[in-house]
Amino acid sequence: MESEVQYTTLIHHDLTRLPNGNILATVSDGSSRYKEDTLAEISYKTGKVVKVIDFKRLLPKSMWKSFTKGDDGKMDWFHQNSVDYDKTDHSILVSSRNQDLIMKLDYRTNQIKWIYSGKKSSTWPQKYRKYLLKKTKGTTTTGGQHGLYLLSHKNGKETIILYNNNVSVTNGDKKNSGKYSEGVIYQINDKQKTIKQTWSYGKQLGKKNFTVVIGFAQKLANGNVLLDFGYKNNGKESNIIEVNSQGQQVWNATVKNASIKAYVYRAYRLEFYPTSYVFDVNQ
């Protein structure tokens, strides 16, 4: 059984490489009370932690002070499950499953750039409201989402992709929670502080592909999107689907009857051979 020290310092969901070569990793704060709400930059030269971001210091106390404790006695109020770096403006993208929230921070100053969640504007302290994104008509509110990543950032507009589990943990869409899960692409206008959904797939599959936890969406070089409905049928199977820009399935595979907790957390499409490889039947 792992020790308390090992548990509070482990890297749990994700990490990314910064331009200086250091690792930015999702960790816990090392306390006996909270977990999975901290980022640590780790020097690739020394292995030492050179920067820490504790989200309890950035977000309202009402979000974390009285959150329900889990079976381990800890408050998993934030549950960060992804981090991505935007070299365009030296910022980071963060996904918080248990707040149904995604946000962007200036990595130099830890200043919030924007926040998107179903939490009503009136319930945020006044100082946060200028960061809240306003959604356009037809734009999904995220719930329990996973795998938030940047696709592009140019002319003041960011295009992002994520897997929307569509489960209202605290601030999600309660009306549609549990009815479906989906991959979603959004465009954010930094100046106007708006968010617009430009593509999605999964709603048409309905409740049979709903996943209360786990999931991933990868934009492929050919324009298609690879979706991992990783906890389908309450974890008894994982359904991986590739969809083209017209919303047509071009590949579909199901992994099931695996060992306990062997469901697919993330699925990636990778090149098996180098692009220059030519098959020669005579070799």
Image (cartoon, rainbow, N blue to C red):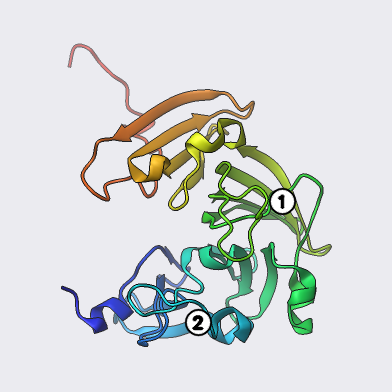
Q: Please, what secondary structure does the residue beneath circle 2 have?
A: strand
Residue occupied by mark 1: 187
Query: Closest to the observer: 25 or 181?
Result: 181
Cα separation, mark 1 vs mark 2, equals 26 Å
Query: Closest to the observer: 148 or 138?
Result: 138
Q: From the top left corner, tell me how far across and down residue 194 is, in percent.
A: 79, 58
Query: Closest to the observer: 278 or 268?
Result: 268
Name which residue lies at 57% across and 23% down: 248
Disc 2 marks a residue whose amino acid type is Ile
Position of residue 73 relative to residue 272, above or below, is below
- In the displayed structure image, the side of residue 60 where residue 252 appears, left or right: left
Mark number, residue 53: 2
Q: From the top left corner, tell me how far across and down residue 26 is, in percent.
A: 42, 71
Mark number, residue 135: none
Quarter holding residue 123: bottom right
Toward the right, the furthest residue is 192
